[in-house]
Image (cartoon, rainbow, N blue to C red):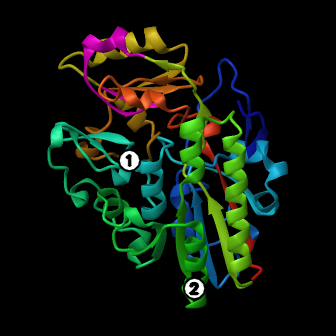
Amino acid sequence: MVAYTGTQGGREYVRPMEPGMEPVKAAYGAGSLDQVVPTLLHGRSATWLPEPVAGARSVVVLLLDGLGWGSLEHHRSTLPELGQMAGGPITTVIPSTTAAALTSLATGMAPAAHGIVGFRIRVDDSVLNVLRWQVPHGRKAPDPFSVQRHSAFLGRPVPVITKKEFRTTGFTEAHLRGSRFYGWSTVSVLVEQCRRLVGQDERFVYAYYPGVDTVAHEFGLHDEYYPAELAFADELVGRLLDALPAHATLVVTADHGQVHVGDRWITLHPLREMFKLCAGEGRFRYLYANKGAAAELLEAARDEFGDVAWVFSRDQLLDEGWLGPGPVIASIRRRVGDVILAPREPVAFVDPDMPNEANLIGAHGSLTADEMLVPLLAARGRG
C-alpha cells in the first residue's frame, strides 16, 4: 500500500486507506485529466498547469499508462527525471481506467458525455470489450462511431505516437478519430518520432507508453519488476527531454494509478440470482439486474459488500456527477449497471463471464486516491 500526504484543489489526501475514508471525486472542468488537452490546445492559463508550459512553442504530452501519483511519490528518490519536474497531482476520471480516461484525455470530455464508461460496457444487448473492441460469441462488434461520436483533440489533426499494432483497432478509431497515427515498435522510435515532429514545427504531439500499467497488472506493485519498470519509464522521460529543444515542453501525465490486489478477488455468488450481466472491471464492477430486481440487488449488494466497497445505484452514480456533470443521455445511462461496486479496500470482484481477469495482480478503476490521483508534470527540453 502506498503512503503519502498531498493536496489537490485545496483538499488533503492521506494514505494509507483507513476505515471511513471518503471516495475521491474527479475534478471535472478544473484540474482533471479531461481538461489537459483543451487547456493546452487553446493556450489557456490555469493554476493547475505546471509552470514550464507557459511560453512553450511546442508541447509534447507523454501519457504513462498506470502511473499513479502515490506510486511516483513513494519511489521519487529513484526517479531522478520525474522527481525533478515541475507540477503535482490532478484527478483522472471515473472509472479510473484506461478506456474511459484515454477517451476523456483525447476528447476533452467526461465519460458521461463521451460514453466510454469502462473497460467493458453494455452496448445494446451485448458487452463490448472496449480495448479489444470485441463482443462475445464471435458476433460483429458495433461501429466505433456509434459508440463514441466525438472527435479527438478538438477536431485538430494532432500527431499521435503509440504502439503500431493499435493502428487499425476499434478503440483507436473510437478515441483518436481524426488524429494522425505514428506507430512505434520500440521506445527509441517513440523518442525519435517526437524529436522529428517537433523539429518539423508541430505545436502539439501526443505520445503513449503502456509499460507501467502492463507490469503492474502482471506482477503487482510489491515485486521488484515494478520499480524496475518505473526506472525505465523515468529513463524514457530523460531521453525525451534530451531529444527536445528548449522551446518545447514535455508534459507527463497518466490515465490512472494502481492498487495491489494480489489474490484478493471476490466472487459475486451471493448476488448471482439477481443479475443477468456484468461489465466494467474488477474495481468498478457494473451489475445489470434481472427485470424488476434492481432495488433488491442494490440492497443485497450493500449488505454483502458494503464493508469493502462503495455501492452505488445507477441513478446515484450519474445524477451525483461521478462520471461527469450535467444530464446523461439515455443511451449512455443504459451502459452503466443498475448497481456499481467500487472497492475501497484492496480487493476486486470477479466477473463470472470473464474469470481470467482475476489473474491480474495490480488493478484499478475505483475511487481511492491511489487510483484517482495522477501526475501532471512538465519540463523544458534540453536538447
Q: In this view, does 204 lie to the left or right of 140?
A: right
* Residue 10 covered by magenta stretch: no
Between residues 101 and 131, which one lies in front from this camera angle? 131
Above or below residue 93? Residue 281 is above
- Residues under labels 1 and 2: Cα distance? 36 Å
- Give me the residue at 48% from left, 44% from top: 97
User: Which of the numbered marks, if any, corresponds to residue 196?
Assistant: 2
Residue type, mark 2 in image: Arg
* Residue projecting furthest to the right: 77
Q: Where is residue 315 in the image (x, y as percent from the top left)?
A: 35, 31
Q: In this view, does 42 lie to the left or right of 337?
A: right
Tag count in the figure?
A: 2
**Residue 88 found in image quarter:** bottom right
Disc 1, SS: helix
**Residue 59 found in image quarter:** bottom right
Residue type, mark 1 in image: Ala
Please name the residue that numbered disc 1 is placed on. 112
Between residues 324 and 168, which one lies in front from this camera angle? 168
Q: Give the range drawn in magenta.
A: 267-287
- Give me the residue at 65% from left, 62% from top: 252
Q: Position of residue 290 (x, y in %)?
A: 21, 19
Above or below residue 197? Residue 175 is above
Between residues 379 and 37, which one lies in front from this camera angle? 379
User: Which of the numbered marks, if any, corresponds to residue 359?
Assistant: none
Q: Where is residue 125 in the image (x, y as percent from the top left)?
A: 16, 37
- Give me the residue at 45% from left, 41% from top: 321
